[in-house]
Image (cartoon, helix red, strand yellow):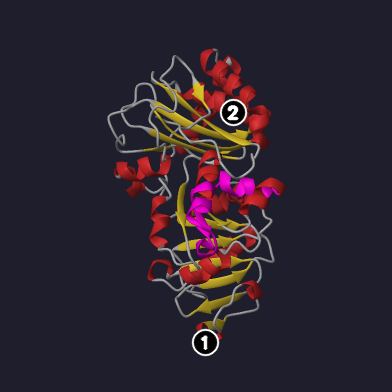
């Protein structure tokens, strides 16, 4: 299918580590940069002073770049993100600094990670040599309850996560951990959630974030883990659409409502790719800021292999074709994470767009594909 873009293995994966003020993300980062898995990593942080780097492990290159004993390159994110990624890539190629195989970006506690994700998708150079590889969100086990009540940024950090880590588990009881897990699952049903103590969790969990690399397309189990739709009855197959916003998760017992809801769409019939793209585009154009996440695996008409869809806050990433389906269920499944106040509108517009596609939008996407094919010839 022509609109599926093949991603190259040479692209450097970029992961975001986010979490509210004092959640423990810096503690996690300090643990990870000294592991074998994150050797040869470019680490972008807000300020060097925020990270307690051992001076014996640091060798200054210039005012903005230091080398860590682990082999990581560490930079302060006081300048523009694009400039930092571009400059360090060129420096590495020239041999000024060591080559790096991954990028970790630590956001500020009040940061909206969607801004960083959008930035990564908005520059041609960055999109050529880097690929966004997912977000890790650290939740403060002691204070996340109040943060979710009062800070919308904390909610978005959960909604945009691929992995959620609950910190300070030694200071809360098991019921509180269960309650935090419960509400985080309701906000983001496809995220993997783990308890964590003082940053001690294996960096191998990053491997669960995907599927974006060519090698991941051959791993159906990883695709299933990435989708992480726990209950296969989340939505009945439909012609062409039906939705459910329960996701098989119980009502949170402790933490207040977050004004974010998720719903899953399951489609039994193969989808026309242009109809699907036009439907997604329509809801993104009208409710872009209210659609935090679109994530799914779809069955495209006249195509045997499944296609992965991944959209964040109005940005739809290139569609990726997988080698095989995770299991015998070949229904298309898309998870939407949206503002609760407009859930029904988004649901209705998306459903109607699948049933009655906009011919002008179909024509537009066909022209885009035709133009891309001509450029590549």
Of helix, strand and loop, which one carries label 1? helix
Q: Toward which corner of the image does residue 299 lie, by quadrant?
A: top left
Q: Tell me which segment is drawn in magenta.
A: 151-179
- Using a 10 Å C-alpha cutoff, classify the residue at mark 1 as few (fewer than 14 neighbours), some (14 to 19) or many (20 or more): few
Q: Residue at x 64, y 61 (%)?
A: 83
Q: Residue at x 32, y 31 (%)?
A: 305
Per the image, the residue denoted by label 2 is 281
Q: Which mark is residue 56?
A: 1
Q: Is residue 212 left or right of residue 73?
A: left
Instruction: Look at the image and tell me whether residue 377 can be seen.
Output: no
Q: Nearer the viewer, residue 332 or 95?
A: 332
Of helix, strand and loop, which one carries label 2? helix
Please give the count of numbered marks on the rendered protein.
2
Which callout, 2 or 1, points to the residue nearer the camera? 1
Q: Residue at x 66, y 28 (%)?
A: 342
Q: Is residue 157 magenta?
A: yes
Q: Residue at x 50, y 23 (%)?
A: 243
The x, y position of residue 339, in whole percent, is 64, 34
Q: Quadrant of the N terminus?
A: top left
The x, y position of residue 59, in whole percent, is 54, 83
Q: Earlier in the sequence, mark 2 or mark 1?
A: 1
């Amino acid at each position: 299918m022509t609109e599926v873009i093949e991603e190259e293995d040479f692209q450097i994966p970029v992961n975001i580590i986010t979490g509210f003020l004092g959640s423990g993300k810096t503690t996690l980062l300090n643990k990870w940069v000294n592991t074998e898995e994150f050797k040869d990593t470019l680490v972008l942080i807000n300020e060097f002073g925020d990270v307690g780097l051992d001076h014996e492990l640091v060798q200054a290159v210039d005012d903005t770049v230091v080398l860590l004993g682990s082999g990581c390159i560490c930079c302060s994110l006081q300048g523009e993100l694009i400039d930092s990624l571009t400059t360090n890539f060129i420096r590495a190629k020239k041999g000024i600094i060591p080559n790096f195989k991954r990028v970790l970006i630590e956001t500020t506690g009040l940061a909206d990670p969607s801004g960083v994700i959008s930035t990564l998708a908005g520059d041609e150079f960055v999109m050529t040599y880097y690929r966004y590889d997912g977000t890790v969100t650290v939740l403060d086990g002691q204070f996340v309850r109040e943060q979710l009540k009062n800070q919308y940024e904390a909610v978005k950090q959960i909604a945009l996560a691929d992995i959620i880590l609950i910190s300070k588990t030694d200071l809360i009881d098991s019921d509180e951990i269960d309650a935090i897990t419960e509400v985080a699952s309701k906000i983001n049903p496809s995220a993997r959630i783990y308890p964590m103590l003082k940053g001690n969790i294996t960096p191998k969990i990053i491997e669960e974030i995907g599927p974006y690399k060519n090698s991941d397309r051959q791993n159906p189990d990883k695709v299933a883990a990435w989708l992480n739709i726990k209950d296969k009855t989340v939505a009945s197959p439909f012609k062409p659409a039906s939705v459910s916003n329960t996701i098989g998760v119980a009502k949170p017992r402790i933490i207040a409502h977050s004004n974010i809801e998720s719903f899953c769409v399951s489609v039994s019939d193969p989808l026309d790719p242009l109809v699907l793209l036009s439907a997604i585009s329509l809801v993104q154009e009208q409710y872009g800021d209210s659609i935090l996440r679109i994530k799914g695996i779809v069955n495209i008409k006249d195509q045997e292999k499944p296609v992965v869809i991944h959209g964040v806050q109005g940005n739809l990433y290139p569609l990726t074709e997988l080698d095989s389906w995770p299991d015998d269920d070949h229904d298309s499944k898309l998870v939407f994470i949206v503002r609760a106040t407009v859930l029904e509108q988004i649901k209705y517009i998306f459903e109607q767009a699948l049933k009655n596609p906009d011919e002008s939008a179909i024509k537009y996407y066909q022209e885009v594909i035709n133009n891309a094919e001509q450029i590549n010839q």
